[in-house]
Each structure stands twice: as structure tokens, then as C-alpha cells.
Amino acid sequence: MAHSRSAKKRIRQTERRTIANRSRTSRIRTYMKRVETAIAGADKGAAQEAFAAVQPELMRGVSRGIVHRNMVARKLSRLSKRIKEMGASS
């Protein structure tokens, strides 16, 4: 249990930050799910639109310190590759 004023303040700040970060993480997951759904449905146009929408969301997550920059680069690269392969098989 926190006893000092600074420790109590830290707890308050952490609670606020946790709520905000959960919301941001959820938002990123939602956008990622839209891309995955479009790819699964073999809809290249929708996949490209969803991919264009997820990029700034992921980069915003990086700038806010929610997700790691390399993880985002890896995910975007893999999604991009999967979307490109959709056109090759069609």
C-alpha cells in the first residue's frame, strides 16, 4: 500500500494511463481484425482500404509507446505481403 504522496499520485496516474492505453490497444486490434477479415474474405479492395486505415493507427500506437516499433513493422510487412499475394492468385 502506498503511503507517501508521490506514491499515491503514481497510482492515480497509472490508473488513468491504463484506461487510455487499453482503449488504444483495443482500437488497434479492431482495425487489425478488419484487415484480417477482408483478407479471409478474399476481397482485395476492402483489404487495401482496411490496410490503409490500420497503418496510421499502428504508428500512433508506436508514438504513444503502446506497441513496439519493430512489431508494427513486422505486422505491416506481413499484411502487405498477404494482400499482394491475393492479386497474384486471382
Image: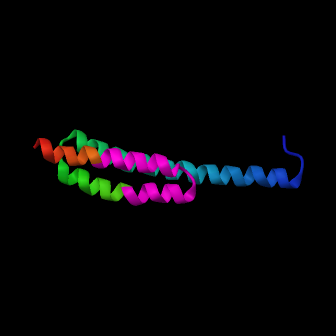
Q: Is residue 74 magenta?
A: yes
Residue at 31%, 58% in the rendered image: 52
Across and down, in percent, residue 12 comes to 74, 53
Residue at 53%, 60% in the rendered image: 63
Q: How is the image coloured?
A: rainbow
Q: Relative to the observer, which residue lies in front, 12 or 46? A: 46
- Disc tally is 0
Q: Look at the magenta stretch and give its main secondary structure.
A: helix
Across and down, in percent, residue 25 comes to 50, 48
Question: Is 89 situated above or below 72?
Answer: above
Question: Is 15 situated above or below 64?
Answer: above
Q: Relative to the observer, which residue lies in front, 47 or 27? A: 47
Extreme residue toward the left, this view: 90
Q: Which residues are magenta?
A: 55-80
The answer to whether 8 appears left or right of 88 in the picture is right
Residue 82: quarter of image: top left
The answer to whether 86 appears left or right of 81 in the picture is left
Q: Is residue 73 magenta?
A: yes
Residue at 33%, 44% in the rendered image: 78
Residue at 10%, 43% in the rendered image: 90
